[in-house]
């Protein structure tokens, strides 16, 4: 499935989950919960009603209550299983990709690395690093509000990092832009890009 289809399924799952937890939810609340415009939330809600996943009933004070139908519960279960399957597949691919990146570091004699990007990939990299002789010095992410992540210090400025041998790119939001930013402050030869990011 393409990225657009996956995003649509994710929004439907979040909508069904929100309604399943609270039938007395407003469309405005749904829009905030989904992180989309009110009109788009309304469109997804109408689609779910049309497909028979959600039933609507009028409540006092011009409010509406939304309920999941049996088909809605079944669809929520199907999408949850699909999401978990995709998540586990991502974890396996990312884990193998990080293992290769750390093997490349070890082959170059780099034992102290900085992860570049606070993300799920950084978490997976930290798990894989524990199985190698590569140490994570910390995380560089100029956009993060975190002071610490995965038990390591997060720097918004790489000059605040102590000595390190190489950088491993772990930004999932904008890896190409992060890579370009890194090349302005670190030699290209010392930037390791896990192949799951598909930059090379």
Image: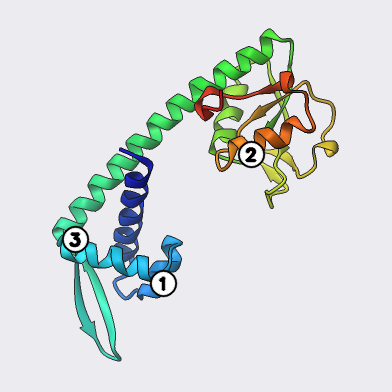
Specify the quadrant that holds the C terminus. top right
Q: CA distance from mark 1 to mark 3?
A: 19 Å
For the residue pair 22 and 57, the one nearer the viewer reads as 57
Relative horizontal placement of residue 14, taking residue 144 as reference (left or right): left
Which mark sits nearer the N-terminus, 2 or 1?
A: 1
Residue pictured at 74% horizontal, 10% vertical: 109
User: Circle 1: is it few (<14), some (14-19), or many (20+) Cα within 10 Å?
Assistant: few
Query: Quick check: can you spot residue 85?
Result: yes
User: Circle 2: is it few (<14), some (14-19), or many (20+) Cα within 10 Å?
Assistant: few
Quarter location, residue 61: bottom left
Dot 1 falls on a residue whose secondary structure is: helix
Quarter location, residue 46: bottom left
Q: Which residue occupies the extreme bottom position in the image?
A: 61
Residue beneath disc 3: 53
For the residue pair 66 and 104, the one nearer the viewer reads as 104
Colour mode?
rainbow
Residue pictured at 43% horizontal, 31% vertical: 90
**Which percent across, then down, holds residue 174?**
58, 41
Q: CA distance from mark 2 to mark 3?
A: 40 Å
Residue beneath disc 1: 29
Residue beneath disc 2: 177
Q: For residue 128, which numbered disc appears in the image?
A: none
């Amino acid at each position: 499935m393409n990225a657009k289809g996956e995003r649509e399924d994710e929004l439907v799952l979040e909508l069904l989950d929100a309604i399943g937890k609270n039938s007395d939810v407003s469309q405005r609340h749904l829009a905030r919960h989904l992180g989309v415009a009110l009109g788009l939330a309304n469109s997804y809600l109408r689609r779910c009603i049309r497909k028979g996943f959600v039933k609507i009933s009028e409540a006092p004070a011009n409010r509406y209550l939304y309920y999941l139908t049996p088909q809605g519960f079944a669809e929520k279960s199907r999408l949850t299983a699909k999401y978990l399957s995709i998540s586990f597949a991502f974890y396996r691919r990312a884990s193998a990709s990080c293992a290769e990146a750390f093997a490349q570091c070890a082959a170059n004699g780099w034992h102290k690395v900085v992860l570049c990007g606070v993300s799920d990939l950084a978490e997976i990299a930290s798990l894989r690093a524990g199985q190698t002789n590569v140490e994570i010095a910390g995380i560089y992410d100029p956009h993060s509000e975190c002071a610490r992540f995965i038990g390591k210090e997060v720097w918004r400025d790489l000059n605040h990092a102590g000595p390190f041998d190489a950088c491993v790119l772990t930004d999932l939001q904008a890896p190409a832009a992060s890579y370009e930013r890194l090349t302005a402050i670190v030699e290209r030869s010392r930037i390791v890009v896990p192949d799951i990011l598909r930059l090379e």
